[in-house]
Image (cartoon, grey):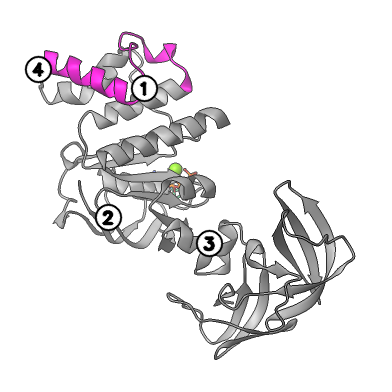
Amino acid sequence: MTQVILDKIQKVYSGGDVAAVDDFSLEIPTGKLVAFLGPSGCGKTTTLKMIAGLIQPTTGRILFDGEDVLPIPAEKRGAVMVFQNYLLFPYMSVGDNVGFGLKMRGVNKRVITERVAEMLALVKLPDIAKRRPTQLSGGQQQRVALARALITEPRVLLLDEPLSNLDAHLRDEMRDLILSIQRDLAVTTVFVTHDQEEAVLLADQIALMFDGLLLQYASPAEFYQRPISERAARFFGGVNFIPARRDNGMVRTDIGDFHFAAQEGERAPSGAAVMTIRPEQIRLNDSAENNSVRGRIRERIYVGTYTRYKIALGAHEIEAIRSADLPGAIGVGDEVNVHFPADRIWVVPA
Ligand SMILES: Nc1ncnc2c1ncn2[C@@H]1O[C@H](COP(=O)(O)OP(=O)(O)OP(=O)(O)O)[C@@H](O)[C@H]1O
Ligand SMILES: [Mg+2]
């Protein structure tokens, strides 16, 4: 079990004029699963390869348990990377693929056979050691790649979009398998994805990246409750954004002024800002008078257990979600009381 620290790492590829990754610092706690999340090209794979030792940062330090690992070559570093396209050796059997890392270390054959069987059982693929990778489905190849990585008992496991080549059903199954193995072995893991939901389901901490920069590093819940910016909030499904000004404990907007319970971790500056609130935290037609404004229902989308409303508020439109169990039908064209609980309002810099 290993703690990983990235300390202001930067990568400028030769011939590249902008940094693929810049000023990137974070701590991956021992035994935890961290997701690198962000759109294509934001530097996720580049960062992973620097941790693995497959490429060197241009500047910055990488520490495993406090030790600078940059002088240590990839094969001795103990961080193994599982690639998106698996990269199994096609002419070797599954068993030889999985046992490869131990063979390179000169481990005795009988031990390798035992460990291969253990690993294939761990990824729930017993009895296929003799097959070739080409005789396996995509999901099975992914498991073999994972077994091949785990057999070396890595200090750090690096998974580059392990689920993106799988269909929806297999993806769920593989995600659960990765999570249970990660929890069982408590191996420090970085999981790369551009899927916000996947990151939320798997990760202890999420590193949200854009354009080579770390925008926010926080727990999944924090991304919903305390996004650092409108961009971060939108990436996590935020839809309600109203231009605002902070004024002590108040947020002033052109639809009204709202009390705002400043929250821990809050970084919004006073001055120009954006007020945001999640649709499920808005209350419609409750009895609250403060922090309430009148709005008109524009659209009503019934989703079974809840209903989603689009509501006109002055020149703005917001969305609110309401449980289907609540009494009192609300229909298109109705005027409603829209309540923003003070402790649910969140303010980010404009
Ligand atoms: N070997 C390379 N030489 C030059 N530029 C590179 C190289 N590899 C990646 N880049 C550039 O660095 C940036 C980050 O690439 P990277 O592969 O890390 O992104 P990513 O977040 O993994 O994207 P994706 O989700 O598409 O896999 C991109 O602009 C990419 O074009
Ligand atoms: Mg990538």
Tell me which segment is drawn in magenta: 109-138
For the residues labelled 3 and 2, the Cα–Cα distance comes to: 21 Å
Residue 268 coordinates in the image, percent (x, y): 51, 79
Task: Identify the residue at horizontal 50%, vertical 34% (top origin).
Answer: 172
Q: What is the number of the mark on residue 146?
A: none
Q: In which quadrant of the rendered view does residue 94 lie?
A: top left
Q: Which residue is mark 2?
A: 29
For the residue with label 1, is its CB less than 8 Å from the closest atom of ligand 2?
no
Looking at the image, the residue that sits furthest to the front is 327
Q: Is residue 303 above or below residue 90?
A: below
* Circle 2 SS class: loop
Q: Is residue 194 left or right of residue 66?
A: right
Read off the residue under disc 3.
224
Q: In percent of the image, x 50 and y 81: which residue is there?
A: 262
The answer to whether any part of residue 107 appears in the image is yes
Provide the residue designation for mark 1: 124
Q: In the figure, 85 relative to 312: above or below?
A: above
